[in-house]
């Protein structure tokens, strides 16, 4: 039985793990891997929330040609990696967005989930909540995302502003607060969609009041133009022949599972229910890109009088909502991605007219992939089920109590993290490792559970030897994570409803995401099969921009793509 380590040994072990995580992704130095061209005037970092690379490959022949498509243009004119990954074990929105411009893994950057359990209070916390700040001109709940307080590292945007004496502008926009805030870093400015009003707003962490261009944009109420408008199929019906049948996953209450779908409210008026409904479908992404255009003009991005680069981060959130509801195999997801392609094509054309694409560097990736719905996986003869996580935890708590004399030893959970009550363990005269092991053994006997890793194993270095172990080790933060982390079997997932699907595992369908770079002066176009990670984006951009990489960055410069 493994025994807990002394503090000096623990420090040495954690340091060794950090070095191991770094060397797993090491790459040989390549002479001459620097860029001779001047830095771009504007760097555009695009994150399509919940986009598996598999969907890009499957539908690539249907993307718009030439300047009609965005994904199609990136594939044709940029560098595209087929084997790029969000290389950590808890593949969710907040963790993935944190990786993009920090170049860091969760064990360093501290964002271990969208929500997690505070180890001290044992209460749930949200990744970007900070009650000291509020949305500007909008109602704010205590758990709303308003600040990057819990992000423990800086980002590329922070380094860019530092190197330019704060003359570079870093602006981010997203349909989700965490999508904007975690891209913006510590010194950028984030704007997020307000699902009760349809506005894009910032928070008092960034400023006391919005600049005039935001106020003017909000006054136009562009979010209202979609009331009564239908989302219809973009392509001929034959183009969707390979998609799952609409009825494979039933619609959620108040939702829809087929096209066309009309956006309206049961009240018959434009209200919060209507604004919230826009999140599942193409119009949220169109609004996000429209606001990004307004930011380019309002902040004069790419035309900085100081002749320093600016950075625009845009996270398109709707694909995640669509995939959650219907699965990446659905017609709705298929059509939505085609619409994202066309919207991005229009956005690139706008940037070309305003700045000239020769002056713009574009990066596109995703925060995570997606599992297919359990119904579809079973149809494909890949065994899959939804696991009721709360019931599983209640069963675990009872098992530990029965085994160890009635003590209540399970404190809280936010799966895949599970927290034990170590004070109760100590009071009962038990060893931490013994209770952890008992919990792990119980979990491994439950249907759909592949593995369970314990705090003692993480701290002793016993979590090692496989790729999945490496990903889970990177995902585990000693100060914030649980005392156990549980992994489902492939295609199984935790869910509280009987429809839809999710993500969050260390398996390829959740980790393999698109990674594309386009910039005529800096990037060599091509289809790259080399292994790459999303954490490579930050050091690669730092190389091109001639700035210091973020402090926690562990990625490599993608030298094979550089001119």
Image (spheres, helix red, strand yellow):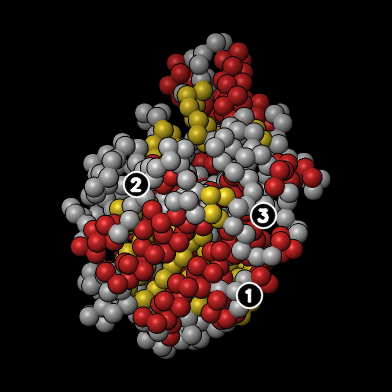
Q: What residue is shown at x 62% (from left), y 52% (from top)?
A: 259
Residue reaching furthest to the top: 405
Residue 260 shown left or right of residue 93 in the figure: right
Tell me the residue that label 3 is attached to: 331
Could one spot residue 321 in this view of the protein? yes
Q: Secondary structure at mark 3?
A: helix
Neighbour tally class for label 1: few under 14, some 14-19, many 20 plus, Cα within 10 Å: some
Residue 235 shown left or right of residue 380 in the figure: left
Closer to us: 479 or 202:
202
Residue 390, percent across and down?
57, 27
Q: What residue is shown at x 48% (from left), y 73% (from top)?
A: 346
Residue 410 shown left or right of residue 380 in the figure: left
Residue 465, percent across and down?
65, 51
Q: What residue is shown at x 61% (from left), y 26% (from top)?
A: 392
Tell me the residue that label 1 is attached to: 528
Rendered image: mark on residue 508: none
Q: Are marks 3 and 1 in contact (CB under 8 Å)?
A: no
Mark closer to the chain start, 3 or 1: 3
In the displayed structure, would residue 480 be above or below residue 420?
A: below
- Dot in front, 3 or 1: 3
Asked which quadrant contains residue 37, the reply is bottom left
Mark closer to the chain start, 1 or 2: 2
Q: Are marks 1 and 2 in contact (CB under 8 Å)?
A: no
């Amino acid at each position: 039985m493994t025994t807990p380590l002394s503090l000096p040994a623990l420090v040495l072990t954690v340091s060794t793990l950090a070095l191991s995580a770094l060397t797993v992704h090491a790459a040989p130095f390549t002479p001459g891997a620097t860029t001779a061209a001047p830095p771009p005037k504007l760097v555009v970092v695009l994150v399509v929330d919940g986009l598996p690379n598999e969907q890009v490959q499957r539908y690539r022949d249907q993307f718009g040609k030439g300047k009609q498509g965005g994904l199609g243009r990136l594939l044709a004119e940029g560098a595209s990696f087929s084997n790029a990954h969000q290389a950590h074990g808890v593949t969710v929105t907040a963790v993935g967005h944190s990786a993009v411009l920090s170049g860091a893994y969760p064990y360093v950057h501290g964002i271990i989930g969208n929500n997690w359990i505070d180890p001290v209070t044992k209460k749930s916390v949200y990744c970007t909540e900070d009650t000291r700040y509020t949305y500007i001109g909008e109602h704010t709940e205590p758990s709303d995302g308003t600040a990057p307080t819990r992000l423990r590292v800086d980002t590329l945007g922070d380094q860019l502003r530092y190197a330019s004496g704060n003359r570079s502008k870093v602006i981010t926009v997203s349909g989700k607060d965490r999508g904007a805030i975690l891209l913006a870093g510590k010194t950028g400015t984030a704007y997020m969609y307000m699902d009760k009003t349809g506005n894009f707003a910032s928070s008092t962490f960034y400023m006391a009041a919005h600049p005039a261009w935001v106020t003017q944009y909000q006054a136009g109420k562009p979010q209202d133009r979609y009331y009564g408008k239908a989302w219809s199929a973009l392509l001929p019906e034959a183009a969707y022949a390979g998609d799952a049948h609409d009825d494979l996953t039933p619609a959620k209450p108040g939702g829809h599972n087929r096209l066309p779908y009309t956006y309206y409210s049961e009240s018959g008026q434009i209200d919060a229910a209507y604004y919230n409904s826009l999140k599942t479908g193409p119009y949220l992404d169109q609004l996000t890109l429209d606001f990004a255009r307004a930011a380019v003009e309002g902040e004069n991005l790419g035309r900085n009088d100081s002749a320093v680069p600016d950075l625009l981060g845009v996270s398109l959130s709707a694909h995640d909502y669509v995939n959650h509801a219907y699965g990446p195999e659905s017609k709705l997801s298929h059509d939505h991605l085609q619409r994202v392609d066309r919207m991005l094509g229009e956005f690139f054309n706008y940037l070309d007219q305003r700045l000239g694409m020769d002056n713009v560097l574009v990066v596109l990736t995703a925060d995570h992939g997606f599992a297919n719905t359990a119904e579809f996986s079973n149809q494909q003869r890949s065994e899959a089920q939804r696991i009721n996580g709360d019931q599983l935890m209640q069963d675990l708590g009872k098992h530990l109590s029965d085994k160890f004399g009635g003590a209540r030893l399970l404190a809280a959970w936010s799966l895949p993290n599970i927290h034990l009550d170590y004070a109760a363990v100590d009071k009962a005269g038990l060893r931490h490792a013994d209770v952890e092991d008992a919990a792990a053994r119980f979990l491994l006997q439950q249907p759909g559970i592949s593995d369970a890793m314990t705090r003692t194993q993480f701290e002793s270095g016993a979590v090692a030897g496989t790729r999945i172990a490496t990903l889970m080790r990177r995902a585990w933060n000693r100060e914030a994570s649980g005392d156990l982390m549980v992994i489902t079997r492939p295609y199984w997932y935790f869910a509280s409803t009987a429809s839809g699907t999710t993500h969050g595992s260390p398996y390829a369908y959740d980790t393999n995401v698109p990674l594309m770079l386009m910039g005529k002066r800096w990037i060599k176009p091509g289809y790259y099969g080399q292994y790459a990670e999303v954490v490579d984006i930050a050091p690669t951009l730092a190389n091109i921009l001639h700035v210091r990489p973020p402090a926690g960055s562990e990625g490599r410069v993608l030298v094979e793509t550089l001119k």
